[in-house]
Amino acid sequence: MKIASIDIGTNTLRILIVECDNNKYKVLHQDREIVRLGEGLSKNGFLSKEPMERALVTLKRFKKICEDFKVDKVIPIATSAVREAKNKDEFINQVKIETGWDVRIISGEEEAYFTYLGVKYGLKLKEDFLVFDIGGGSTEYICCYNESVKYKSTNLGVVKLTEKFLKHDPPKEEEIENIRKLVKNTLKGINMKKCKGKTVVGTAGTPTTIAAIDMKMSKYDPNKVHGYRISLERIEEIFEFLKSIPQRERRKVPGLEKGREDLIIPGLIITIETLKAFKTNTLLVSEWGIREGVIIYETACERKVK
């Protein structure tokens, strides 16, 4: 059976097509595009016309890909931006008209759970671990301890933080510190003491981009990124370099995806402060996350994860 998951995020739209047979997955195709659907959302609470149009163009392209692969089932989900938008119904209805898909808006808790399933299955983790998923509108934290799982969804989204705090290019130190202060205060409110000192896994755009930058990737390779380990010290070095140069120079950095040159700054701050808060010096990067988790949840393959 061929299944596609469509992740309609605040910043990035992603598609994953897999073949599920005998409780095993074979990845047939994956793609993503930065459309910044949540651009301007924090100002008035509405999805703007141009971001919605960009998203619809990408979703129609994804639909054509699904048709080419003769996908049996499509699972489209929407996260923070659509979840919070006052005009969410307008966007969802337009997606239905353009693609025929019924988009499911998931909660922050569901977002965290699906991410947990994808990471656990993808990395074959047996030990206790913490996962954090940095999105454009929110960041989810998942603590897996002694087979119990605790979730927390926060408002630490890189698009939100960029629009609220970063007014200069390169950013001023005061702007950096304002983001850092907010991240630290948010992390203090996350009661996940049992995951301190455990393996910390980062998934989604920021952690995978950090890995790609460290490997100086001219062309992104998900297989090399998945399972990559990088030290806190090295992440801080990357941060110090990127925050000191303007966006036009960041675009030339190998591994830094186009459209992420401003968002990488708050993303790096979240990553650094998360590692410090959970008392670990190493980040384990997962290419697997919410897209895979949704498919795992929707199929019999979920039984192999528990």
Image: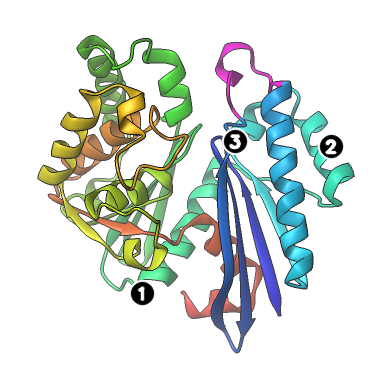
Rendered view: 227 above or below 133: below
Q: Which residues are magenta?
A: 38-48
Secondary structure under tag 1 reads loop
Instruction: Pick whichever of labels 2 and 3 is earlier in the sequence.
Output: 3
User: Coloured how?
Assistant: rainbow
Rendered view: 274 above or below 142: above
- Mark 3 vs mark 1: give the one in front: 3
> Quick one: label 3, few (<14), some, or many (20+) residues within 10 Å?
many
Q: Which residue is mark 1?
A: 124
> Quick one: label 1, few (<14), some, or many (20+) residues within 10 Å?
few
Is 238 positioned to the left or the right of 291 in the image? left
Instruction: Pick whichever of labels 1 and 2 is earlier in the sequence.
Output: 2
10, 181: nearer the viewer: 10
Residue 75 is situated, as x and y percent measured from the top left of the image, at 70, 59
Q: Which residue is mark 2?
A: 94
Residue at the (62%, 80%) spot, across then down: 20
